[in-house]
Image: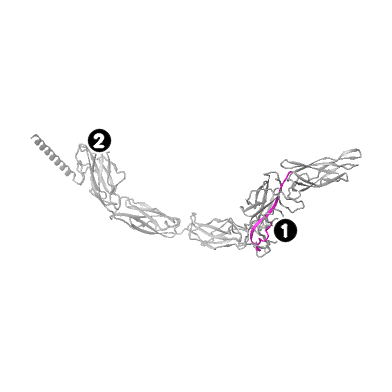
């Protein structure tokens, strides 16, 4: 019975409460999600004291507080509840947070969540702080234009230490995007100018309130290799409008601008004025040095590409301008591949210069056809021969007779001086190769100002079985060195055009190392083939200017052209040991007399260059006062061994001198020779 009475009491209390709630709702004006009381200070927030929920959710009276979620139309001027979401037309999500006593909770953190396939929040954090009326709001937008389906949005907050939440449902329908016509602020701009282009974005016929991204492009901006215009590629809408900036980079024509979003495209045309050329500047000549016609190969080019750049007053490149070219000289047949060229996208106009037959400096003149007052010149182009000629190819040795027969590592220098047919130094970097019969040669070298050198050092192999062409029977210690470089045969330029036109020339065959110094190739002597097909007779030039420039017989081709320029010399590996003093017996026949002798090393070669000679003597005689001794002194120039490769050695003289002779001086003279290394040897001379 008590339970029945209690249950009835509870029912009456609930009914009274519901009546009060209904009156409160009616007083606030009603609505699916909260109140529209005049106490509400903003369009989408409420301070009405109801706990009514949304149309599908709805708050619940608890002892821990309440959260009520309401979805509202963001595009409506007044508070309108809405549960349909479309791309570009967001919803306002409102969460009213109250305590269990129905008091609004300010500054409470509310977290909004939903299915990411359907909706997302702006800002993307999905959290908001309640205002003084206990209301937190967020903006819900469709995840994409193609989003479709139904989702639930949940608002969660913490009140009085308890976590409470509420949710509401919404549906998502795909959005239909349209664009207004594309508008260009200024339809015609000057060269390198800028302008704006804009369009409005609509979603389902309504100007988009959410951010939409539109892609922009233009024909000039997309041109290769570098764009001739620049336009913002992706632009986000602001209040339904997208605005891009177009900047000219040398388009110089009508350009179509395209705006695209979700398959929708709009276009507009802008006219860009061509830049006005104000200058032509020299860019380069590649290569800056070329070689006369007929001497190409091995990196020696006969053509050079000369480039000029057409620019405007701001130094920007100007394309499509016609430039004319001319040469400062055409001597020897210098030519251009064309007389005009049109500047490319980089403003560059090019012309090719082909060398003639005469070396010369030259420049290319460039003139703007539209304005002949705009001119320029190439400053650093030159034509050279490039090849050493045999007539001007020289080989020398620093020391011809080094102390190398019994010593390793004694050094000298082999040097080349090479010039072209006009006597100009060959180009830097011309390679010269050295080969030798013996010793050690540091080959090759490359020229600088027509010169280059290598070290030659004594060491094995030391020739021991040669039969040199001399009356001294030399067979040891003489090393033939050959130097050669790719060059040309000499000719007599009788008409002065620096080009061979059938004039007399000096034919060359294959060079060789003349080990035995007889001037002709013999079996086992090394040779270097230049033209394997050449089998003609090689005649010795009658004027002797090819001294030490030998050719193997039967390797000439009978025609002027390229071949190895070559020279050879003999290096002597001299010994410090005296081999011969001849004669070594001298008759006086007078009181004073000068004698000459030949001095040679143990191989009948000159002793080392710079070796010093000294005499000591015992030469008694009598004069009117009694016994005396004569002196023996070397004559000027005889006290040292000269620099020479002469077979048989060197010649020296000394003077035996007495005074008031009754009997002539006679006796012995000792000759000592000290080499540069300090080693010495001696020889006795008899005076009769």
| Residue nearer the viewer, 298 or 53 | 298
Q: Inspect this view and state whether residue 36 appears.
A: no
In magenta segment, residue 568: yes
In this view, the residue farthest toward the right is: 624
Residue bearing the label numbered 1: 544
Residue 340 at x, y percent in the picture: 53, 63
Magenta run includes residue 312: no
Is residue 280 left or right of 152 when viewed as pictured? right
Is residue 82 placed above or below 297 in the rendered structure? above
Q: Identify the residue at horizontal 9%, vertical 34% (top origin).
A: 2
Q: In the rendered image, which quarter is residue 682 located in?
A: top right
Tags 1 and 2 in contact by the CB under 8 Å rule?
no
Q: Where is residue 166 in the image (x, y as percent from the top left)?
A: 23, 42
Q: Which of marks 1 and 2 is nearer the N terminus?
A: 2
Q: Is mark 1 on a helix, strand or loop?
A: loop
* Mark in the foreground, 1 or 2: 1
Residue 276 spot, x, y in % from top left: 48, 58
| Left or right of residue 21: residue 627 | right
Residue 219 in sight in this render? yes
Question: Where in the figure is residue 133, as x and y percent of width and height?
Answer: 24, 40
Q: Which of 447 and 345 is in front in this view?
A: 447
Q: Which residue is identified by label 2?
A: 161
Does residue 513 appear to the left or right of 273 in the view shown? right
Q: Please report the bounds of the magenta region as a residue range.
A: 549-576
Whether 621 is drawn above or below 496: the answer is: above
Q: Residue furthest top?
A: 2
Dot 2 lies on which element?
loop
From mark 1 to mark 2, how far is it between C-alphas?
119 Å
């Amino acid at each position: 019975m008590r339970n029945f009475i209690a249950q009835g009491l509870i029912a009456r209390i609930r009914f009274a409460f519901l009546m009060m709630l209904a009156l409160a709702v009616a007083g606030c004006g009603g609505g699916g999600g909260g109140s529209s009381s005049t106490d509400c200070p903003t369009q989408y927030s409420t301070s009405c004291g109801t706990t009514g929920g949304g149309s599908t959710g709805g708050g619940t009276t608890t002892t821990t507080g309440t959260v009520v979620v309401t979805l509202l139309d963001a595009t409506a001027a007044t508070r309108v509840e809405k549960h349909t979401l479309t791309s570009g037309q967001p919803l306002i999500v409102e969460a009213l947070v109250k305590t269990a006593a129905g008091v609004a909770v300010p500054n409470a953190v509310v977290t909004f969540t939903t299915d990411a396939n359907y909706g997302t929040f702006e800002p993307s954090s999905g959290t908001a702080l309640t205002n003084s009326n206990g209301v937190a709001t967020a903006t819900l937008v469709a995840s994409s234009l193609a989003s479709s389906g139904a989702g639930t949005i949940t608002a969660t907050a913490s009140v009085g230490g308890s976590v409470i939440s509420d949710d509401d449902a919404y549906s998502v329908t795909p959005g239909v995007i349209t664009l207004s016509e594309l508008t260009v602020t200024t339809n015609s701009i000057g060269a390198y100018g800028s302008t704006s282009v804009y369009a409005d974005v609509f979603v389902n016929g309504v100007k988009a309130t959410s951010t939409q991204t539109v892609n922009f492009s233009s024909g000039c901006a997309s041109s290769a290799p570098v764009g001739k215009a620049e336009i913002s590629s992706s632009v986000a809408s602001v209040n339904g409008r997208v605005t891009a900036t177009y900047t000219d980079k040398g388009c110089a024509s009508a350009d179509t601008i395209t705006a695209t979003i979700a398959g929708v495209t709009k276009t507009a045309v802008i006219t860009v004025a061509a830049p006005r050329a104000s200058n032509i500047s020299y860019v380069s000549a590649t290569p800056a040095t070329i070689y006369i016609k007929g001497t190409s190969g091995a990196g020696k080019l006969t053509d050079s590409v000369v480039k000029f750049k057409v620019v405007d007053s701001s130094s920007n490149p100007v394309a499509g301008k016609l430039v004319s070219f001319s040469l400062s000289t055409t001597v020897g047949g210098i030519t251009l591949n064309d007389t005009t060229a049109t500047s490319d996208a980089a403003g560059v106009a090019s012309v090719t210069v082909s060398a003639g037959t005469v070396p010369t400096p030259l420049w290319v003149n460039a003139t703007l056809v539209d304005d002949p007052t705009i001119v320029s010149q190439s400053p650093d182009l030159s034509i050279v021969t490039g090849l050493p000629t045999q007539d001007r190819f020289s080989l020398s040795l620093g020391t011809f007779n080094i102390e190398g027969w019994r010593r390793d590592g004694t050094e000298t220098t082999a040097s080349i001086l090479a010039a072209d047919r006009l006597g100009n130094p060959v180009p830097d970097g011309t390679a010269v190769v050295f080969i030798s019969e013996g010793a050690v040669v540091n080959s090759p070298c490359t020229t600088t100002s027509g010169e280059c050198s290598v070290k030659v050092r004594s060491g094995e192999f030391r020739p021991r079985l040669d039969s040199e062409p001399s009356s001294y029977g030399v067979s040891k210690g003489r090393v033939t060195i050959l130097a050669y470089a790719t060059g040309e045969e000499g000719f007599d330029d009788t008409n002065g055009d620096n080009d061979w036109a059938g004039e007399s020339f000096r034919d060359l065959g294959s060079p060789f190392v003349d080990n035995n110094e007889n001037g002709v190739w013999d079996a086992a002597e090394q040779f270097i083939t230049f033209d394997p097909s050449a089998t003609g007779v090689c005649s010795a030039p009658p004027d002797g200017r090819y001294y030490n420039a030998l050719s193997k017989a039967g390797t000439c081709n009978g025609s002027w052209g390229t071949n190895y320029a070559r020279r050879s010399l003999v290096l002597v590996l001299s010994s410090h040991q005296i081999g011969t003093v001849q004669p070594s017996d001298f008759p006086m026949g007078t009181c004073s007399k000068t004698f000459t002798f030949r001095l040679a090393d143990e191989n009948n070669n000159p002793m080392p260059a710079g070796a010093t000679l000294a005499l000591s003597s015992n030469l008694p005689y009598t004069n009117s006062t009694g016994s005396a001794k004569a002196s023996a002194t070397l004559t000027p120039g005889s006290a040292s061994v000269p620099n020479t490769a002469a077979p048989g050695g060197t010649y020296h003289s000394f003077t035996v001198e007495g005074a008031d002779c009754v009997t002539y001086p006679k006796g012995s003279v000792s000759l000592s020779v000290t080499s540069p290394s300090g080693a010495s040897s001696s020889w006795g001379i008899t005076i009769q």
